[in-house]
């Protein structure tokens, strides 16, 4: 299945669904600007970016790829890849630390429909 197909809205999405990922990408860019100041210190110390994750949770970024019907922002895989790339421009360790398997699980949820998961 092509990534573009995963980004298509489902019949269960709200009218304000971020189908093209622009909202999530803008949020990632804003966070990247904020994280940039901590990135060098995190790289030097090797510490986990705890403060960055706290901030991403606070603004809703961690639920970006979760389907809208489950309380997320509904960004598809391609949109999340673009957002993660934008986030890495501020602090490369932050998106690298995000669990990769979650993208697979979220894709399965999006394709099968939340009512069947």
Image (cartoon, rainbow, N blue to C red):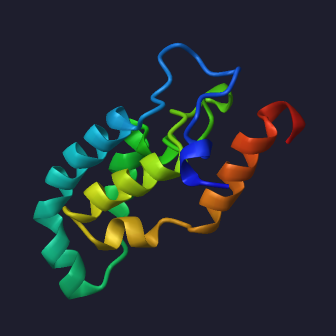
Please provide percent x and percent y for residue 55: 33, 48
In the rendered structure, the answer to whether residue 23 lies left or right of residue 30 reads right
Residue 79 at least partly seen: yes
Q: Quadrant of residue 12?
A: top right
Q: Quadrant of residue 24?
A: top left
Q: Residue at x 68, y 55 (%)?
A: 1
Hey, which residue is sitting farthest right in the picture? 116
For this rendering, which residue is in front, 40 or 87? Answer: 87
Please provide percent x and percent y for residue 59: 36, 37
Q: Residue at x 33, y 35 (%)?
A: 22
Hey, which residue is sitting farthest top in the picture? 15
In the rendered structure, the answer to whether residue 59 lies left or right of residue 101 reads left
Q: Relative to 24, is 34 above or below? A: below
Please provide percent x and percent y for residue 100: 57, 68
Q: Quadrant of residue 18?
A: top left
Q: Residue at x 22, y 82 (%)?
A: 43
Q: Relative to 34, is 116 above or below? A: above
Q: Relative to 67, is 86 above or below? A: below
Please provide percent x and percent y for residue 54: 38, 51
Label count reads: 0
Quadrant of the drawing holding the C terminus: top right
Residue 49 at least partly seen: no
């Amino acid at each position: 299945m092509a990534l573009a197909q995963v980004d298509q809205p489902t019949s269960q999405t709200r009218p304000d669904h971020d189908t093209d990922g622009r909202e999530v990408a803008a949020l990632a860019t804003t966070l990247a600007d904020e994280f940039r100041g901590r990135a060098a210190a995190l790289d030097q110390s090797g510490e986990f970016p705890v403060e960055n994750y706290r901030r991403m949770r606070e603004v809703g970024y961690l639920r970006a790829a979760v389907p809208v019907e489950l309380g997320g922002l509904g960004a598809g895989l391609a949109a999340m890849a673009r957002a993660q790339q934008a986030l890495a421009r501020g602090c490369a360790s932050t998106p690298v630390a995000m669990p990769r398997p979650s993208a697979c699980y979220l894709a399965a949820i999006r394709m099968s429909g939340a009512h069947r998961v």
